[in-house]
Image (spheres, coloured by chain):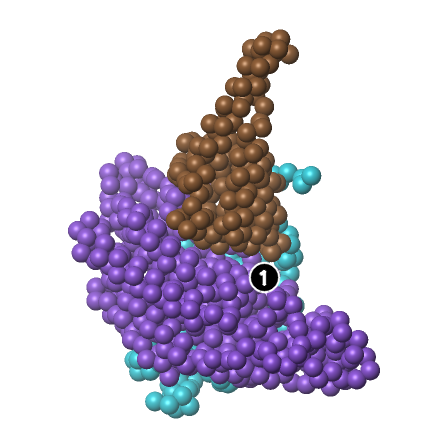
Amino acid sequence: MGRETLIDEIRTKLGDAVEGVSYSFGDDVLTVRPGSLRSLMTALRDAPFDYAVLLDLTCVDFAAGEGRLELVYHLYSLSRNVRLRLKASLSAADPVAETLTGLWKNADWLEREVFDMFGVRFTGHPDLRRLLTYEGFEGHPLRKSYPWRLAQPRIPMKDKV
Amino acid sequence: METRIQREARPESMLINMGPSHPAMHGTIRVMLELDAERILNAEVEVGYLHRGFEKTCENKTYFNLLPYTDRLNYVSPLINNLGYAMTMEKMLGVGVPERAQLIRVLMSELSRVSDHLTCLAAMAMECGAFTVFLYMMKAREFLWDVIEFTTGARMTTSYIRIGGVRADLHPDWRGSLATAVRETRRVLKDVGGLLDKNSIFLGRTRGVGVISKEDALSYGWTGPCLRSTGIPYDVRKASPYLVYDRLEFEVPVGEFGDNFDRYRVRMREMEQSLRLLEQVAVLIPDRAPVTGEPAIEPAEAIRVSRRQKTAARIRLSPNLEGSEKARYADLMTPDRPAALGSAACGVVVPPKEDTYTTMEGLISHFLFFMDGHGIRPPKGDVYFSVEGGNGEVGFYIVSDGTDRPYRLHLRAPCFHIVSALEQLIKGRLLADLIPTFGSMNMIGGELDR
Amino acid sequence: MSGLDFLTTRLETALGWGRKYSLFHYPFITACCGMEYMSAACAHFDIDRFGAGLTRFSPRQADLLLVVGTVTHKLAPVLKTVYDQMLEPKWVIAFGACAVSGGIYQNYAVVQGIDRIIPVDIYIPGCPPRPETVLDGLMKLQDKIQHQKQDWRWAGKP
């Protein structure tokens, strides 16, 4: 089905989860409510929408201006060759979202990375711990509040002569 | 600091750490294994040893300045990363790229893709014991890198593909060096095929090892040669063609079983297809007459003359800037939006040096391009674009807030998803199966950890 | 004591000659410079003709630690452990801008030069350095090894 009809189908079938539809530089974007994220994703993954691939999950930090963290999901439908972007806003003070671990297998590491970099907790994740930084690292580096050059060395650094 | 595998290990099994300093030259990744004699009962993969803060750094650099950081992501095919970033920005800015620049971009992409596959298979074969294959493939890679070096100036991390076009034109003898590279690579591929395709040791180590099903591969978000080895023919160049790929003829090789040998065969056949593409592109790129003819004047004299009148003579630029003269700009860079005096708008590309040194408008647009707070300022919003990298779909997600620095830049790294499946692929197998499995995944640390 | 001096000088020359032409290196490869290391080690820009072609994949068997590529704070303890596991005499080459000084990365994750962790003998700049630069750095290290003095106090030399 064409892109507009696809978006309409999603809206009609899953209307209460979808807050808004927009069109950004040629990409389709759906804004969703974080509470209904998992049910929406389950519906999107299966037929008839058939978004079989979770391409990417990332987060954008709008904490300073708008007090929210925005999760951004990219889905891809192999059979129909269309991409979709979904955004869900979480509160910056206590960002919690449901995990997608049962639906796609790469959600495991993607959510660990978002937790590591932004501090978003995913309820139901089997093993939520840091992925790219190390245990003992305090803070979440990609938050705007984390200083860019604040290093936390694991072993003492000698002074450069 | 107890790791998960230490907590879950049975008391009678052995814990082995294949530490971050890997003898197999894939970079830095840590694989902790719980072994029962040679059989792997459980595995844990720890990544992040090359996390260099790419995304945080990009939030603090202007769109033009962060181009060298994109080179160092997938460092065996750096021009493809450049391309992905440049095309994402062009999508956001809504600029088109001239035809010749598109053809040159395809040429550079395919050269990078071949060197990526060569490096991957060379390392994989060397770890299985075939050292000759490694040396042969490195030899072929040198010829490919020669072509890249004569045009861009650097062998590896080039920053050649810019937003709006390419940095400079191809070097005068590009046809000769490209023909040599293609010929030598074909010879190496034939030799390596003869050495490995029917080799019982290699087949024994890779056939039926590291098998993944189609459903699992899709569920893990695999793309690229690893996904195509399971039988799914998804290639971004065919699915959503960019540049001139819709005009070029090439096949997308697929495997059948999704094991290591299929990944090896898919990469070998992809290299043949890339060589085909290189030959087609070489035919399509028209020959440009070298920039000679009218007598050229030295820049100092041009500057002196331009103080009184606009100079029309051709200016002889330094050899470092060869190929990027104003005469080539129409073919290589998107047409610059003229910077009106006093206006805040500036173009998408650096103005040509002849203008910068001799005209007022050129100087001002040069300043406006590089000044802090000015420069490329895309409209607010977010954009995602992906290209076919050596490992799969390389995507860039950029959020812009209207200033000259990105608010957020995220790389969709293909090998992140591929390596996340490693634990499943080696569970229950022998310890020696880990090596070709991991080798065939082509894990590149710069892309995995960003 | 001139006889002893003559002997120690000859011995030092012989030791230096022996050590510099039989370097066993341990490539501590992390990032992009690894590709140029591979080029330097392979047939085109052979490192073997300098005697340094034998890659020992264990630090206990190597005497040259080639730190190739970026070292992050997560990896720093590992580098220190590998360096400590090597036996004397050992040398360290910082290969590439990231190992020399952190390179183009100055942020929360990258060590600004491995000489903050371990002592370094030769710095090879470049991002990545051309294989000829690597060979030049290796030759400088060979010069350094040739002129290293030994400790002869045990032989009675003051």
Horizontal side, residue B349 vs residue B385: left or right: right
Closer-to-camera residue (C83/C93): C93
Image x and y of residue B337, in percent: 65, 85
Inspect this view and state whether residue B290 appears.
Answer: yes
Image x and y of residue A64, in percent: 65, 68
Tell me the element at label 1: helix
Picture quarter containing residue C2?
A: top right
Closer-to-camera residue (B206/A35): B206
Quarter of the picture containing the C terminus of chain A is top right
Inspect this view and state whether residue A111 appears.
Answer: no
- Callout count: 1
Closer-to-camera residue (B199/A12): B199
Chain drawn purple, letter?
B
Residue that appears at 40% across and 48% down: C42
Horizontal side, residue A30 vs residue B372: left or right: left
Residue occupying the far right of the picture = B308
Q: Tag 1: Cα neighbours inside 10 Å, few (<14), some, or many (≥20)?
A: many
Residue that appears at 40% across and 45% down: B22
Inspect the image, locate mark 1, and give the three-letter code of the amino acid beneath it.
Lys
For chain C, the rendered hue is brown
* Subunit under mark 1: B
Image x and y of residue A76, in percent: 38, 76
Quarter of the picture containing the N terminus of chain A is bottom left
Horizontal side, residue B347 vs residue B90: left or right: right
Image x and y of residue B24, in percent: 37, 47
Residue that appears at 36% across and 74% down: B279
Chain drawn cyan, letter?
A
Residue that appears at 26% across and 70% down: B254
Figure check: A9 above or below B46:
below
The residue to which callout 1 is attached is: B56
